[in-house]
Every structure is written in C-alpha cells, then in structure tokens.
Image: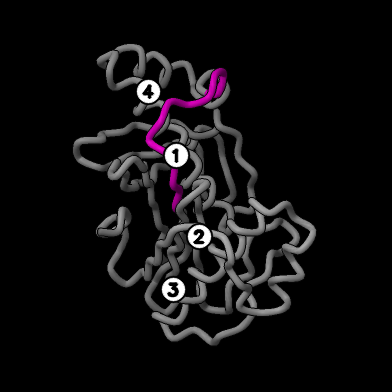
Amino acid sequence: MSIFAGLLDPRIAIVERAIGDGLAASFPEEEAAVAPAVAKRRREFLAGRNAAHDALAKLGAPRKPLLPGPDRMPLWPAGYVGSITHTDCHCAVAVGRADDGVRAIGIDLEPAETLPPGVLETIGRAEEIAWLQSAARNERDLLARALFSAKECTFKCQFPVTREMLEFEDLSIEIDLRAETFKATFERDAGEFPRGHTARGRIRVANGLLASAIALYC
C-alpha cells in the first residue's frame, strides 16, 4: 500500500516508486537538466520526474518536460501544483489541480531512523526540544525525525504561495503520531500568513519510512 494513501485529499494524485538504476528521461530537456549531476542525483531526479509525469497524466495534464525553475523547484504546467520527495531508495509525487481548489502541496519522505548528530539542535525550537525530552525514551528518535519531516513538507507547501525561504525556527510543530496528524504554526509573518497562523497536515510511519503531507486550498 502507498505510504501516502489517505494522507491527502482524494482529488490529489499520488505516485510512488523505487529508485533504481537504468532510468531513462522522459524528455531530452530533462536529461540535459540533470546531465552534470552525480549518478545518485541523476537517479533521484529522473525517478521523481517520471513519477511526476504519471501523476500529472492521472489528472489529464498535457505531457511536456518538467524542468527546474531558477529556485530549483519544478515548473509545473499551468493550472497544476505539486511536490516531489525522495529518500535514497524511494520517491513520491503528489499533484493537484487549481480547478479542484488545490493551491499548494508539500510532501516529505524520510527513513524512519535517528537524525544525524547535531540536526535536532539545528531544527528544533526550545519548546520542541523540551517536548521531545518529555516523551518516552524509546519514541524520541522517531519523533525527532517526524519533527524534521513536518517542517520540511510545510516549507515546501508554503513556498509557492509566499516565496519565503523560512528557517527551521520560523515554524513550530505539534505532532500526534498515533493520530497521524501534525499542526504547524508560523512564528513570524510570511507573505499572507501572519505570525500565529496554523496549518494542519498528516504524518505516517510504515515500512521503515516516515511520510508527511500538507496542502493549501483556495
């Protein structure tokens, strides 16, 4: 079963797949865009783009190259929004239509593993670290990874709307892994979202992966 199944509105198309060797680009322009990259990055890029084309096809989008823009974000076809994420071995894409009221999407996929040393201190606000320290010891590592993932997917969702490059301290996160939910609160003004604005997303752990997802609607 898809790890993202049920985490987003059913009108949003989701495609997931393993990342392997031997992937071919769907368009020469995509091949050229990633040609200078190392092999690992090339595999990730092509897997993500191929999955994105499949997701767009589900929604009836025109088939055309999906190239990175100046900010390295995909230039989705007019009237469509989406998000691409991957681990070393797995990628996922979520795409929605503006005509369905979908304004922006953010998804993130992580290994359900301990964060590298020093990362928590970089991403966590004081109250978030205190919350983690109050959790059961055997849950802290996974909750720390979930905190990172929830921030990442919220960053990706808000950026097309605000064009703001947020720092980790600019969002505070509350997570309920058992309910598969999280709440993100803006800790500074960002575009149309004032400090204190909240957005709610979904989060799940399954098959050694941790997935988070959030969408904004018109």
- Give the residue type that dot 3 points to: Ala
Q: What is the C-alpha distance between the residues marked 2 and 1?
A: 14 Å
Label 4 crowd (10 A; few <14 / some 14-19 / many >=20): some
Q: Are marks 3 and 2 in contact (CB under 8 Å)?
A: no
Distance Cα–Cα, label 1 vs label 3: 22 Å
List the residue tagged with mark 3: 55
Quarter placement of the C terminus: bottom left
Location of residue 114 (image quadrant): top left
Say which residue appears at 44% left-offset and 73% top-offset.
55
Label 4: element kind: helix
> Quick check: is 170 in the magenta stretch?
no
Which tag is nearer the camera, tag 4 or tag 1?
Answer: 4
Residue at 53% from the left image edge and 45% from the top image edge: 155
Q: Earlier in the sequence, mark 3 or mark 2?
A: 3
Q: Which residue is mark 2?
A: 83
- Residue under numbered circle 1: 149
Q: Please, what is the three-letter code of the amino acid marked with disc 1?
A: Ser
**Mark-to-mark CA distance, 2 and 4:** 26 Å
Cα distance in 3D space between marks 3 and 4: 33 Å
Dot 2 lies on which element?
strand
The vertical placement of 86 against 210, above or below, is below
Which residue is identified by label 4?
141
The residue tagged with tag 1: helix, strand or loop?
A: helix
Residue 48 sits in which quadrant?
Answer: bottom right
Magenta stretch: residue 108 in it? yes
- The residue that appears at 46% across and 65% down in the rendered structure is 103
Q: How many marks?
A: 4
Q: Nearer the viewer, residue 128 or 208?
A: 208
Q: In whole angstroms, how far apart are the C-alphas of marks 3 and 2? A: 11 Å
Is 124 rendered above or below residue 42? Answer: above
Amino acid beneath label 2 = Ser
Amino acid type, residue under disc 4 in the picture: Asp
